Amino acid sequence: MKTTFRKTLERIDFSRVFSELEKKRVKRVGIQLPDGLKFFSKEITKNFKDKGYEVIVSGSASYGACDVDLELLKEVDILVHFAHLPIKSVKRVIYVPYRYDYEIGNLLNWVDKIEEKKIALAGTAHYAWKFPEVKKFLEEKGIEVKLSEGKGRIKIPGQILGCNYSILKKTGAEAILFIGDGTFHPKGAAIYTGKKVYFFNPLANEFNVFDKEFVEDFLKKRFIQISRAMQKLGEGVGIVVSSKIGQKRISLALKLKLAAKNKGINSDILLFNEILPEGLANFPYGFYVNTACPRITYDDYEKYEKPVLSPQEFEILLGIRDWNNHKIDEIL
Ligand code: SF4
């Protein structure tokens, strides 16, 4: 993986960043890196120090463009946020997204495994930039390909985020082909669409499938979480809100609090920057509703001692939403 990050680093166009810094007469620069690039912090900061800038590196996590280090921004003239396409425009922040280059031809080893004739392409931004070429490649193999624009925080056709699958809405596709690394996004795509998701990891040259059974299993697990929470209603509920700029949903939390009150359930809104199991462990609530990054609810819930529900699942528990209308939580 380090080789991939190194290659990615080599492809970053620092000249654009430096010309912006010059224009703005910057003296002190903040650097924010995702975990995969933190290993290269010395090389990255050297680029800036050699040009005479004073540099401060963020030690915090950087989960996405939803997670701009606002504390560091207070201390610097400009913050350079690496690896993500912008979600919100924030004054004095320069975003430096990166793109993995990958061999589209490697799909040839797997294309026979795709049974459907009409598919939708989906991937994270690091991969989706190459989708027009992927579409052409697959169409030459006789597969009809939908490459759709998304809503809100989605910036390029085919891009999905763990909190936004809008490109997959009403595509008319029979199945999805996800290109990227990790399993969180293809799982989310399967749950969102209820369709079969093929996923191709170009870095490992691996191809796999999430089928309808996976979705059924996921829903069973979510049902168990709701049932566990139901037994703890008497202990009250903690409604978790993140202070991260692209995750903060205070109005949603207030709406859920009011809905709980109307059903006679005690709740408190809890504001965190970083939501971690140890942060919730000291609180006395029977269960939690997560309004921050949906990954916490779906990917990390087993790390938490008490049930963690999505806003939609909490509505099911309150009886104001039907189980058949269980929807994946999105931040549009
Ligand atoms: S909220 Fe979560 S899924 Fe959405 S961009 Fe941020 S880290 Fe990714």
Image (cartoon, rainbow, N blue to C red):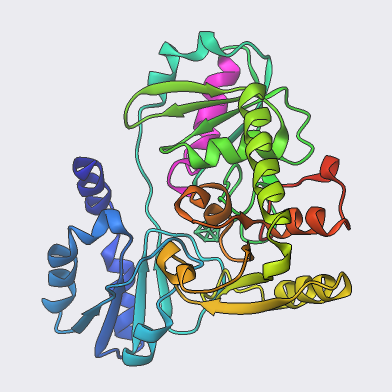
Q: Is residue 190 above or below residue 10?
A: above
Where in the figure is residue 153, as x and y percent of width and height?
62, 61
**Residue visible at 49% across and 48% down?**
302
Q: Is residue 53 magenta?
A: no
Q: Is residue 128 above or below residue 172?
A: below
* Quadrant in which the C terminus is drawn: bottom right
Where in the figure is residue 234, as x and y percent of width and height?
72, 67
Q: Is residue 103 above or below residue 180?
A: above
**Residue visible at 87% across and 69% down?**
263
Q: Is residue 139 magenta?
A: yes
The one nearer the camera, 285 or 215, is: 285
Where in the figure is residue 290, as x and y percent of width and height?
61, 63
User: Could one spot residue 320 in this view of the protein?
Assistant: yes
For residue 248, which quarter of the picture?
bottom right
In the figure, is residue 123 to the left or right of 151? left
Q: How many marks?
A: 0
In the figure, is residue 164 to the left or right of 56? right
Q: Is residue 62 above or below residue 168?
A: below
**Residue visible at 27% across and 65% down?**
14
* Quadrant in which the N terminus is drawn: top left
The one nearer the camera, 73 or 217, is: 217
Where in the figure is residue 200, as x and y percent of width and height?
45, 27
In the figure, is residue 171 to the left or right of 285? right
For residue 46, which quarter of the picture?
bottom left
For residue 266, which quarter of the picture?
bottom right
> Which segment is the magenta one?
125-140
**Residue visible at 87% across and 47% down?**
322
The one nearer the camera, 206 or 111, is: 206
